[in-house]
Amino acid sequence: MFLTAALAVCLARISPLAGNASAALAVLFASRAGAGSAAVTGGAVGLAVGLTEGGTPLLGAVLAFSGAMTGGPSARQKRLGTVLLFAACGLLATAWVQGEMELAAALVLAAVLYSLLPEQLLRRADRYTCPPAAPLSAPVEAAVPPSLARTQFRLEEQATAFRTLYEHIHESALRGEPPESSAVIFDRVAERVCAKCSHHPVCWQRHHTATCQSLTQALSAMLDRGNGLMEDFPGPFRSRCMRMEEFLRVSNEELYRYFNRQQYRSRLKNNRLAVCRQYAQLSALLSAAATQLGDEPERDPSGSAAAERAVAQLGLEVRCDLRLDRRGRRTLEVWGKRLAPLCGDQGGELLSQALGVRMEPADVYRVRQGQRLVFRQCPPLGATVAAAAKEKENGQPNGDNGLWFRDEDGVLWVVLCDGMGSGTGAAKESKLLMTLLKDFLHAGVEPAAALTTLTGALSLRGEVNGGFTTVDLLQVDLFNGSAALYKLGGAPAYLRKGGSLIRLTSSALPAGLETDRESAPDVSRFRLAAGDFLLLVTDGVTDGEGDDWLRSMIAQYRGESPRELAQAILASPGAGREDDRTVVAVRFSNRT
């Protein structure tokens, strides 16, 4: 600053305009270091120049005011705005103190010169005008508790172990046992029938080639048809065989046993693959759990303090803890005694005003020191869910089951399950799958992994009880409207968005019908907004016929009640009568 003031004083002795302009230019350089530095520089350099011969004593006040108004973080980033603001403030101050026009001209000249300087030169000057920032200590990361770190490490190790086990046994399980040749059918018939016949040497030694050709010809027809007939065997063979009726009867018995062995091997292979895939799913679940352990929400001390000050207005002494998850969504916990005034809508509104986002009460717990209240950020998108159902017209219970709930992350889940057939058995199967799926989702398991795991498990159970269940699983993030529909078989779903109607279908097998391949649900992803309708229906609604009438009803409906729409669909003459029928309708709206 001393060298700057000395230079400005020297120029002022040569020309007052040059001295004033150089002092103003020094203030602009100092403004890059902050408002305080610019104000001090303007006052000191302006005073020094003003006291020289030909200067004005008011220069220091004008430059100090202009520097204080101009300096700040934006001085480095927005040079044009800084120059214009400096010139405007300088001219205003000059007019206020009734300064000379020469002072105003010096300010404008300095602003023009400063705006023409290359940025590289200004950055070099920052080394002298902007003092280096005090070194900051490295950010202290939240220490992970040793027990949590050990648990996370063990889960990762267990996930790796199960994955390695899956990789080692999957290939052998996929390969299975060597296939059995169909020729074994007549080998066993020969042992049971021909070995006791007196013509055995004639058929199996003297006419061995002809016998094998005749049996090969008959075997092809028997395998295609599923049983053997007398005419399947060539005439010479029938005339030569002394026990043809017994030979045919035993051949059909061995053919039936052969088919049973083939089916058993196929089921055994599928079961082994299903168990093998369970290892892979278990590995994925453990790995996901290990990842979630390290995903701790971030604390917000300033928000916690704001909440405490707001609650203090009600005369309550509380302790608040505000946390933000990885998506920036807030959860507030409040500890204290006699917290009844906060439990209703009044508490949610009070805390919403304090935090600047809408909060809603979520849970109430009793603790040793009083109560603990949990408030969560309220999602902007609301959903109204309604269902209508009718059982098959035979007096049996409805085999369809459905549920919906919103989790603590602001995600809406809607599940519709349709058990095979109707009645008590179908209702039991669909309710079992629905309950298991709800438990998995509440536990934080990803929907695709949950459905794949349950499909494999139910296919093993189906080996004893039989049956299958179709599944529609809707997932909607009510904060941003992103949605996904997971389907395992079942009837189409219908999404009415604006003026268009989208039909969502599935080619995946229902849960419980496992094949030798990895089964996964079909997934449709889309984004929902206020005014959209989404309908899930079971296949009994259309009864296997066309759904033109259903699509027309959904497209032409102008009301806002999902219950009204669901009931109207079931009451329509086009709705089926030969199976259980269920409609789940969801309408989305903005929350006020």
Image (cartoon, rainbow, N blue to C red):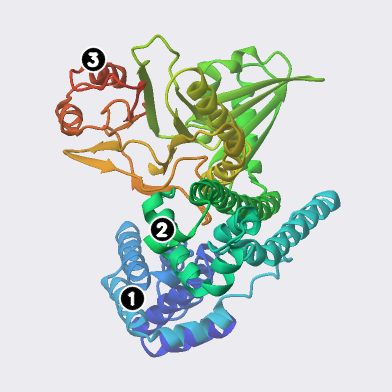
Amino acid at dot 3: Ala
Give the amino acid at mark 1.
Ala
Residue that appears at 80% across and 51% down = 151
- Say if 285 sits above or below 53 in the image: above
Location of residue 177 with respect to 333 vertically, above or below: below
Name the one closer to the observer, 343 or 171. Answer: 171
Q: Which of marks 3 and 2 is nearer the N terminus?
A: 2
Mark 2 Cα shell of 10 Å, populated few (<14), some (14-19), many (≥20): many
Locate residue 2, reporting x and y percent: 58, 81
| Mark 1 surroundings: few (<14), some (14-19) or many (≥20) residues within 10 A | many
- Going from the N terminus, do you reach mark 1 or mark 2 first? 1
Give the residue at mark 2. 233
Q: Regarding mark 1 in the picture, which secondary structure is present there?
A: helix
Identify the residue position indicated by label 3 in the image: 571
Of the image marks 3 and 1, the number of the one nearer the N terminus: 1
- How far from the left and from the top, in percent, is residue 89? 35, 62
Q: Mark 1 points at which residue?
A: 111
Question: Which of the 4 image quadrants contains residue 570?
Answer: top left
Are dots 3 and 1 in contact, CB under 8 Å?
Answer: no
The image shows residue 369, relative to residue 298, as above or below, that is: above
Please provide percent x and percent y for residue 44. Answer: 53, 71
Report the number of numbered marks.
3
